[in-house]
Each structure stands twice: as structure tokens, then as C-alpha cells.
Amino acid sequence: MEIDSIKEKLKNIKYDSNEVKYKKFEKLGIILNQSNEGQKSNNYVCSVCKKCLISSHCLSIHCIENHDTFFNLTSAKKPSFVCFLEECKSIVFNKQERKDHCIKDHKFPVDFPDF
């Protein structure tokens, strides 16, 4: 997909002011499918960089935070980093705050990897 085409589609995406809508990436043609190329069935693969993640929610987080220019522009101005647990509605200002939240509130191990 050409860069201009992606930029045009990004302009048309409307983000809720209280919560980033991660499923909007489907409109950009970024596939959020499970990998079935000999990997475990719980791995989800980013179609842009081929990184494997553990859930569709984590894959969506990864795609938005790493491959979305609009996210990079807006995340500096408002809380935009959602919790890794889909059922948790916590949204914070940066990755470190999210990591601290996950360790404190969800008892994640201190050394868990970031996406």
C-alpha cells in the first residue's frame, strides 16, 4: 500500500476522544489475523513488521503504537496508551505508566516485555 494512500485513509479515521479505537486499523488493510504458518495458535502476527503477539488486543495495540503516525502525534497531548488486558479500561500517558499500572494493578512480572 502506498504511503499517500495510507495517509489519506488515516485522515478519514475518527478517534473517540476518550478511547483509542484499535479496530480502526482494519480499515487501513492491516490484517489482524492469527498466524497459521506453523506457529502456536495463540500467536498473532503483525502484517507490517511480522512481530508475534499473544492476542488480537495486543496486536492492535502494537499496530497503533508502532505503525500509526496519527497516534504518535496525538499521544503526546492526551492519555492514549491502553492496558494490555482487554477488560481493563485504564488509559495512561506513556508506556512506562502502563507498565507500572500492569505491574501494580494486574500483578504482571516486573520483567514482562513491552510490545
Image (cartoon, rainbow, N blue to C red):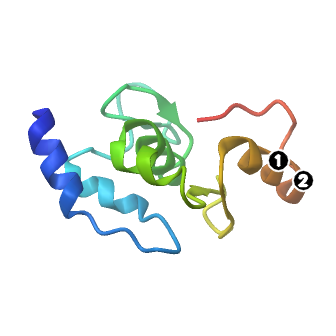
Question: In the drawing, what numbered circle is on residue 10?
Answer: none
Measuring from the top left, give residue 36's x and y in whole percent.
Answer: 36, 34
Relative to 1, does residue 94 appear above or below in the rendering?
below
Q: Is residue 91 left or right of residue 44?
A: right
Q: Nearer the viewer, residue 36 or 105?
A: 105
Separation of disc 1 and disc 2 at Cα?
A: 6 Å
Crowding at dot 2, Cα within 10 Å, few <14 / some 14-19 / many 20+, comes out as few
Q: Is residue 20 left or right of residue 87?
A: left
Q: Across the whole image, how many numbered discs are drawn on residues?
A: 2
Q: Amino acid at mark 1?
A: Asp
Residue in the picture at 38% in, 26% down? 50
Residue in the picture at 20% in, 47% down? 29
Q: Amino acid at mark 2?
A: Lys
Measuring from the top left, give residue 51's x and y in whole percent.
Answer: 45, 27
Q: Nearer the viewer, residue 105 or 9?
A: 9
Q: Quadrant of residue 3?
A: top left
Measuring from the top left, give residue 1's x and y in whole percent.
Answer: 12, 35
Q: Which residue is mark 2?
A: 104
Q: Which residue is mark 1?
A: 100
Q: Is residue 28 left or right of residue 56?
A: left
Please tell me whether mark 2 sits on a helix, a strand or a loop.
helix
Measuring from the top left, give residue 108's x and y in whole percent.
Answer: 83, 45
Circles 1 and 2: CB atoms closer than 8 Å: yes
Please tell me whether mark 1 sits on a helix, a strand or a loop.
helix
Residue in the picture at 50% in, 49% down? 61
Relative to 105, does residue 61 appear above or below in the rendering?
above
Q: Quadrant of residue 48?
A: top left
Crowding at dot 1, Cα within 10 Å, few <14 / some 14-19 / many 20+, comes out as some
* The C terminus sits in image quarter: top right
